[in-house]
Image (spheres, coloured by chain):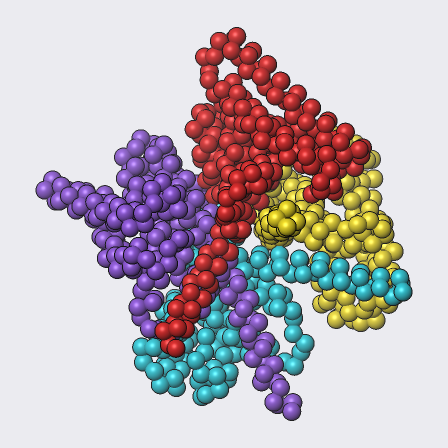
Chain colours: A yellow, B cyan, C purple, D red
Amino acid sequence: MHADQDGPVRRWERRSEIPLFAASLLFLAVYAVRVLVHGLPAGWRNACLVVIVVLWSLFAADYLVRWRLTGRWLGFVRTHWLDTLVLLMPLLRPLRMVRVYTAMQSRRDQPRLSLHARVITYAGLTSVLLGFAGALAVYQQEHAAPGATIRTFGDAVWWVCSTLTTVGYGDVAPVTWGGRTIAVGLMAGGLALLGAVTGSFSSWLVQAFRREDENDEDAAGPAAG
Amino acid sequence: MHADQDGPVRRWERRSEIPLFAASLLFLAVYAVRVLVHGLPAGWRNACLVVIVVLWSLFAADYLVRWRLTGRWLGFVRTHWLDTLVLLMPLLRPLRMVRVYTAMQSRRDQPRLSLHARVITYAGLTSVLLGFAGALAVYQQEHAAPGATIRTFGDAVWWVCSTLTTVGYGDVAPVTWGGRTIAVGLMAGGLALLGAVTGSFSSWLVQAFRREDENDEDAAGPAAG
Amino acid sequence: MHADQDGPVRRWERRSEIPLFAASLLFLAVYAVRVLVHGLPAGWRNACLVVIVVLWSLFAADYLVRWRLTGRWLGFVRTHWLDTLVLLMPLLRPLRMVRVYTAMQSRRDQPRLSLHARVITYAGLTSVLLGFAGALAVYQQEHAAPGATIRTFGDAVWWVCSTLTTVGYGDVAPVTWGGRTIAVGLMAGGLALLGAVTGSFSSWLVQAFRREDENDEDAAGPAAG
Amino acid sequence: MHADQDGPVRRWERRSEIPLFAASLLFLAVYAVRVLVHGLPAGWRNACLVVIVVLWSLFAADYLVRWRLTGRWLGFVRTHWLDTLVLLMPLLRPLRMVRVYTAMQSRRDQPRLSLHARVITYAGLTSVLLGFAGALAVYQQEHAAPGATIRTFGDAVWWVCSTLTTVGYGDVAPVTWGGRTIAVGLMAGGLALLGAVTGSFSSWLVQAFRREDENDEDAAGPAAG
C-alpha cells in the first residue's frame, strides 16, 4: 500500500497514527453522546458539535500533510482512496485501525501473536467498531421515522448483529432511505471483515489439529526407540 | 476457456470485446429507461424497443461470427455455454466482463494490480452490474403485482442488496413467479461472485499481515547486525 | 472411504452403481408423482406405492450384498454410515452421486474437467437433487397444515432456494415439526455442499486470473527477446 | 496454547480432563431438567440447584489448581482466557471439548481420522452442544416474555438451527434483552465453528476428487506399460 518505505511520509505516519486513533475514538464517543443522550442541554449539544468539527479538521489536516509530503497530486487520492473515503465519512475511521495495530505492535517489544490470531483480532475489532458506528448512524436516521422498527439504540445494536452475521431475521430493519444506504455500506464493509474472521478461525483450527499430529509423532518417536 | 490461443477467433474477440461491452452497457441503460421512466411517450418507448432489438442483433451477430470462425458445431455451444446463456438473457452480459477487463489491462501498459485485488475488482464490479440488472428485472415483474412488497425501484435495489449479501430480512421479497425465478437466478450467479470477493479479501488480508512480518524481520536484521 | 480397493465389493459397486442411480432417480420421480398429482385415482396411487416399495427393496438388497461381500459386521455399518443413512432415508440417495459420477467418468474415455469444475458440477448437481427431494418432503408435510405458509409446490421450491442460499426471507417457512425436522436435515446437508460450490468457484476464479498472468508473461517474453 | 509442555499442569490436565467433561455434560443435563421440566416438585428443583452449585465449584477448583500449578498470576488469566470465560459461563464448556477429544484420541490406540474429518467432527459436535446450551438459555429467557415468539423448547431449537446456519427466517426470534444477548454470543461462537465445518468439508471434497485423479493415473500407468 505504500510506495515510499522510509521517507518523511512514513515517519509522519508513525508519529501521528496513535494520536489520530485516539482522536477518532473521541470522535466516535462525542458523536455517540450527541446521538444517544436525549435530554442534553443546548449548551452541551453545541459543545459536542464544536468538538466534532475540531476533530474532523484534525483529520483533514493530517490528510493534507500526507498529501504534501508525498509530492504527488491525483495519484495520492487514487492510491490512498481508503484515506479519502475515511476523511469524507469519519465514522469509517475504524477501518484504518490496521496501521494503529502495526504501530502499537512495533513499539512494544513483545512476542507477536500468530498470523491467524492477529488477523482475527484486527478484523474482529474493526468490525466491532464499525458495527458500533453503524448502529449509531442507523439509530439517528431511523428512531423517529414513521413505521420504523428500530426505535431504541438497543434495537439498532441487535439489528447490526443480525446483519453482520448475515442472519437477518427481519424483525427489525431500516425503513428510511438514509438508514438503508447506511445498511448497505455496513454490509459491504462488515461482511468482508467478518468473512476474514471466520476464514482465519477455520485455518487456525485446521493448523491447531495439524500441529497436534506432529506433537504426537514427536512424542511417539522416543517412546518407540 | 479458449481451445484456440492465437487464431482468428482470438483476434476477433480482442477487437470486438470493448465495442460489445459498450453496447451491453447501452443495452442496460436503454432497458433501464424503458422500465423506470413511467410517463415515457409512446414514441420514445418504441425507440427504446428498437435500440434494444438492434443491440441484441449485434450480440447475435458476434456469436455467429465466433461460431463460424471456430469451425466447430455443437462443441462450440458446449464449450461456450456462458456465451450462449448470455445471448439468450442479455441482462447477464456483465458476467462476460472478465474478457473486457483482460482486454483493457493488456492495452494499457500499466503495472497490474495484485492477484487478489484484481479478483475483488472483477467479481465486485460484475456483481454490482448483475445486481443492477436483477433489480430492474425484478422491479418490472413485481411493481404492479397485487400484494407485492417491491413497489419502487428503491425497494428492488434494497432487496437485491439484502439478497446478495445473504442477509435476507424478508421485509421486501418477490411474490410473483416471474420475480422469484429471477431471484433464484440472481442468487445462483451473485452469491458465487460475492463469495469470491469475500474469500479474496480474506486471503489478501492474511497476505498483508504476513508481508508485514517479513518487512519487520528485514528491518530488524541490519539493526541487530 | 474404501478399505478394499480391488476386491469383489469394488467390482460389485462398479457394476451396480449406474442401475442403482437410475433406480433412485425413478424412486424420486414416482415419489414426486404420488406427492404432487392430487386427483390421482386410487389404483395409480397404489401402483406408485408398490414401485416405491420394490425400489426400496432393491436398495436394501444392494446394501446386504455389499455387507456380505465385505465380510465385516458392525465395522461395515460404521465405515459405510452414509450408505446406512441413505438406506433409511432414500430421498437422500443423491448424496451418493459421487460414485456414479466417478463410474461414468471412468467409462467414457473423455478428457476430464478440471478439478474445481468437477467439484462444482458434483456438489451443484447433488444439491439440486437434494433440494428437489427436500421440497417434495416439506411440501408433503406442510401443504395441509393449519397456518402453513408453504401451500403449493412452487412455494416449497422457493423456500428451498432461499434456505440453501442462507438468504432466508421468512415469507414462507415450515410450521409443522415434521417440516422443520426435514428443514434442519436439508440445511445440514445442503449448506456444506453449496459452500463447496462457492469455495471452488472462488478458487477457480483466482486460478483463472493467475493463469492469465502467466500467459501474459509468456507472451511478453519472446516479444522482448 | 500451552506454555508448559510436560510439567505438572499438563499431567493434571491429562488426568482431570475426562472427569471434568463428564461433569460438564451432567451440568448441562441437570440445567436442562431444571429449565424444561415444568411441574418439577420444589424438592427436586432444589436438588438440581445443589448439583449445579457443586459442579460449578468443581470447575472453579480445577481452575484454581491449574492457576497454582502454573505459578503465574495475571498472565494465566490472559493466556487461559477461554478457560476464564468458560468458568464464568459454564454453559460454554463444550467449547473446551478440543482437549477432551485429544485426550480420548491419545488413549485409544486407534488409527486416526483424517485431518479434515477430525476438524469437522470436533467443530460439528462442539456447535451441536453449544446450540443445545443456547436453546436452553434462550428458552429460559423468552418463554414467558410478553410478545415472545419462542414459546416452547421446540421453537428454541428451531430458532438455534435457523440462526447457526445464518438462514434467519425471523418467524421466531428473541424479543427480550437477555435472550438477544445470548443470541449474539451464540452467533459469535457458533458461526465461526460452523464456518470451520463448511470450509473443512469443502477442502475434504476437493482432496477426495484430487486423490481419485491420482488413483486413476496409478491404475492407468501399469495398464499402459
Question: Is C112 located above or below residue D79 in the figure?
Answer: below
Instruction: Between residue C66 and residue B100, name the one nearer to us.
Output: C66
x, y percentage for residue D71?
80, 33
Residue D152 visible in the picture:
yes
x, y percentage for residue B73?
32, 80
**Residue B157 vs residue A217: left or right?**
left
Number of dots carrying numbers = 0
**Residue B222 vs residue C130: left or right?**
right
x, y percentage for residue D65?
72, 27
Residue A68 visible in the picture:
no
The quarter in which the C terminus of chain C is drawn is bottom right
Q: Quadrant of residue B223?
A: bottom right
Q: Residue at x 55, y 15 (%)?
A: D48
Instruction: Between residue A16 and residue C164, name the one nearer to us.
Output: C164
x, y percentage for residue B86?
41, 69
**Residue C207 vs residue B215: left or right?**
left
Residue situated furthest left in the rendering: C43
Q: Residue at x 46, y 32 (%)?
A: D157
Question: Is B57 located above or below residue C223 in the figure?
Answer: above
Q: Residue at x 80, y 60 (%)?
A: B216
Question: Is B144 located above or below residue D151 in the figure?
Answer: below
Q: Which residue is drawn at 85% across and 49% down?
A: A108
Q: In which quarter of the image is residue C39?
A: top left
Instruction: Between residue D137 and residue C27, name the one nearer to us.
Output: C27
Residue situated furthest bottom in the rendering: C225
